[in-house]
Image (tube, rainbow, N blue to C red):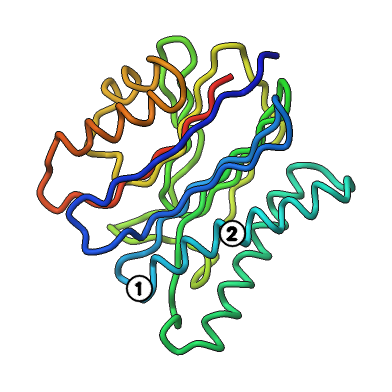
Amino acid sequence: MSPLAAGGGQVQGTRKRQEDAWGLERYGESEVLALVADGLGGHPAGDVASREAVREFVEQFGARRARGTATPRQWLQDATLATHGALLGMARTQRRLREMATTLVALYVRGAEFWAVSVGDSYLLLLRGDRLVRLNELHAEAGGLTSCLGFNLARVDVADALAVQPGDRFLLASDGILALDDDEIAGFLGEGDAAAAVGALLAAVEQADLPGQDNATAVAVLA
């Protein structure tokens, strides 16, 4: 496999603050962990929830990976539960953080395989050839989330050991990316390196100039 390329970025849209967070952790040329979290705007401290979720998840996942026991699927699941617990603990000790919550989607690629975990309604997309597919189910119903970290963790979806093909392009994104349709996302994601793809996607979101545009965050991982 060729070295993995990865990059990320975000725009604030028309919101008063940025409540998305993202992360990239490299463990080698062909091993990377990518994350996007979207703090819930209807709850307190969405910016704290998303930022702390990314930080805690990277730490928890890295510790499990370093021990080398269990499987990547278990690392993702355990890191998700530990992150949820950490957010609950913060909320118990700081009144201003009570009921804070966030989505989380994480992708771990190692060589010719990938694993993923998803909570909430952030997106994990795969562009393979000219076909764009969503790899995760959205935990949302009637305009609200049915599962999130830090408040109501009702469901955690984990994808186990799926094959990476040369040329695959993954995109993790908050729902602010929905300013673009599937064809637009595929077109931007399919061009250039990871940083260029993310830059083009986010520039297009800003140019769409939708009323009430949400925060938009995108992280691309290219095989």
What's the residue at 64%, 20% (across, down)?
164
What's the residue at 27%, 39% (across, down)?
178
Image coordinates of residue 62 in percent, x first then y, are 74, 51
Q: Is residue 81 above or below residue 151?
A: above
Q: Observer-nearest residue: 113 or 15?
A: 15
Which marked residue is nearer to the observer: mark 2 or mark 1? Answer: 2
Image coordinates of residue 87 in percent, x first then y, are 56, 72
Disc 2 residue type (three-letter): Arg
What's the residue at 41%, 21% (across, down)?
132
Image coordinates of residue 83 in percent, x first then y, are 62, 64
Q: Is residue 137 above or below residue 101?
A: above
Q: Observer-nearest residue: 5 or 45?
A: 5
Disc 1 residue type (three-letter): His
Mark 1 residue element: loop
Q: Which residue is mark 1?
A: 43
Quadrant holding the N terminus: top right
In which quadrant of the rendered view does residue 80 lie?
Answer: bottom right
Position of 77 compared to 216: left or right? right
Quadrant holding the C terminus: top right
What's the residue at 59%, 48% (across, down)?
157
Q: Residues within 10 Å of mark 2 (few under 14, many from 20)?
A: some
Image coordinates of residue 57 in percent, x first then y, are 63, 57
Q: Which residue is mark 2?
A: 55
Q: Is residue 213 above or below residue 52?
A: above
Q: Residues within 10 Å of mark 1 (few under 14, many from 20)?
A: some
Q: Observer-nearest residue: 144 or 49?
A: 49
